[in-house]
């Protein structure tokens, strides 16, 4: 006779790191603000075109210029955020006494140099 085994499912809540959550929220807010700004700029330029205050060609050119400037600013902002995040993570790792990637690379270089010196000494004997 086969017995039925009841298996209870456990729900595992994902641990949310407040630091990562804060970064996620800031990035999402930035994306939302960017989207709103783009929409408002397009509406404004379209109104100017409708009123005949600027030519359609000039309006499109203006929107393209604005988009390019926003892309450049977004790249700069992304770089700054990335650099700041990297600095904070490195500081956190230092406080926790965990070696960083650069620490490990420096140690690897020193080990390689010492290995070459040992090999050279062995060859002399």
Image (spheres, grey):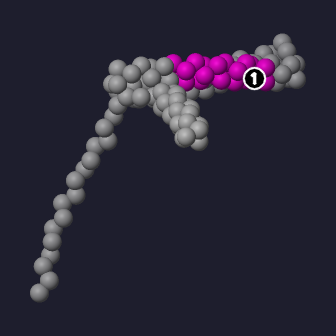
Q: Of 40 and 92, which appears nearest the observer? A: 92
Residue 33 visible in this rendered orientation of the protein: no
Q: Residues within 10 Å of mark 1 (few under 14, many from 20)?
A: few
Q: SS at mark 1?
A: helix
Total labels drawn: 1
Please give left or right for residue 66 compared with residue 11 in the image. Answer: right
Q: Is residue 99 above or below residue 14?
A: above
Rendering quarter of residue 52: top right
* Residue 75 falls within the magenta-colored stretch: yes
Rendering quarter of residue 75: top right
Q: In this view, does 82 lie above or below 122?
A: above
Magenta-colored segment: predominant secondary structure: helix
Q: Is residue 33 above or below residue 104?
A: above
Q: What stretch is highlighted in magenta?
A: 64-84
Q: Residue beneath label 1, please? A: 68
Residue extending furthest toward the top: 53
Residue extending furthest toward the bottom: 1
- What residue is at 44 percent from the left and 24 percent from the top? 89
Q: Position of residue 93 (x, y in %)?
A: 39, 25
Of the 4 image quadrants, the one containing the C terminus is top right
């Amino acid at each position: 006779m086969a017995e039925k085994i009841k298996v209870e499912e456990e729900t595992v809540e994902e641990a949310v790191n407040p630091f990562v959550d804060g970064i996620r929220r800031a990035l999402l807010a930035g994306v939302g603000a960017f989207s709103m700004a783009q929409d408002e700029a397009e509406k404004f330029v379209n109104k100017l075109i409708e009123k005949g205050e600027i030519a359609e060609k000039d309006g499109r050119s203006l929107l393209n210029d604005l988009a390019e400037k926003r892309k450049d600013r977004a790249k700069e902002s992304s770089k700054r955020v990335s650099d700041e995040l990297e600095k904070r993570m490195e500081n956190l790792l230092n406080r926790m006494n965990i070696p960083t990637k650069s620490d490990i690379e420096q140690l690897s270089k020193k080990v390689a140099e010492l290995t070459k010196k040992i090999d050279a000494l062995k060859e002399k004997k």
